[in-house]
Amino acid sequence: MTERNYDPKKHIEYLMSKRPEILLPGLEKTGSVDDKLKENRQKQSFDYSNYIRNKRLQFELKKEEEQRIKSLEESKETKTKSELKRQKMNEKTAKKREARQKRKRNQQAKKLVKNDNASLEANASSKS
């Protein structure tokens, strides 16, 4: 005996197509039980699609929240980096400014010493 591919779903569909139309009190003559079943299936599939849509929206909102948090953390990080960089630059410029001022004071002191020495020599030569 050869084995057939038995599909219970197809068999039920075949039996449903062969059965006579049953009128229920809630259905009109044109409606059938199949229509009611189709409506229920559509409602179920619609509910399932809502479920999927809600899950997708939740996932997207979660992802957006994570992205927002990540961007805030990155902005804080870059802000602190730029602040540190600015502080280092300020320290460097302060050191350079201090060195320039020190050189300037030394040069002025040398000029004063030269001028004092020159004036002392001039006074000494004028006294003699």
Image (spheres, rainbow, N blue to C red):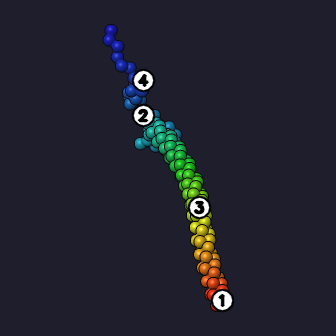
> Which residue is found at the position 53% from the left and 49% from the top?
63
- Name the residue carrying label 3: 88
**Earlier along the polypeptide chain: callout 3 or callout 1?**
3
**Most foreground residue, 76 or 31:** 76
**SS for tag 4?**
helix
Residue 77, located in which quarter of the rendered image? bottom right
- Name the residue carrying label 4: 8
Q: Position of residue 126 (x, y in %)?
A: 64, 90
The Cα–Cα distance between marks 1 and 4, rounded to whole angstroms, is: 137 Å
The Cα–Cα distance between marks 2 and 1, rounded to whole angstroms, is: 147 Å
Disc assigned to residue 21: 2
Judged by depth in the image, the label closer to the viewer, 3 or 1, is 1
- Name the residue carrying label 1: 128
Is 89 on the left-hand or right-hand side of 16? right
Amino acid at the residue labelled 1? Ser
In this view, 12 is above or below 31: above
The Cα–Cα distance between marks 2 and 3, rounded to whole angstroms, is: 88 Å
> Which residue is found at the position 66% from the left and 86% from the top?
124
**SS for tag 1?**
loop
Q: Position of residue 17 (x, y in %)?
A: 38, 30
**SS for tag 3?**
helix
Amino acid at the residue labelled 2? Glu
Is 11 on the left-hand or right-hand side of 84? left
Picture quarter with the N terminus = top left
Judged by depth in the image, the label closer to the viewer, 2 or 4, is 4
Amino acid at the residue labelled 4? Pro
Residue 94, located in which quarter of the rendered image? bottom right
**Earlier along the polypeptide chain: callout 2 or callout 1?**
2
**Earlier along the polypeptide chain: callout 4 or callout 3?**
4
**Most foreground residue, 63 or 124:** 124
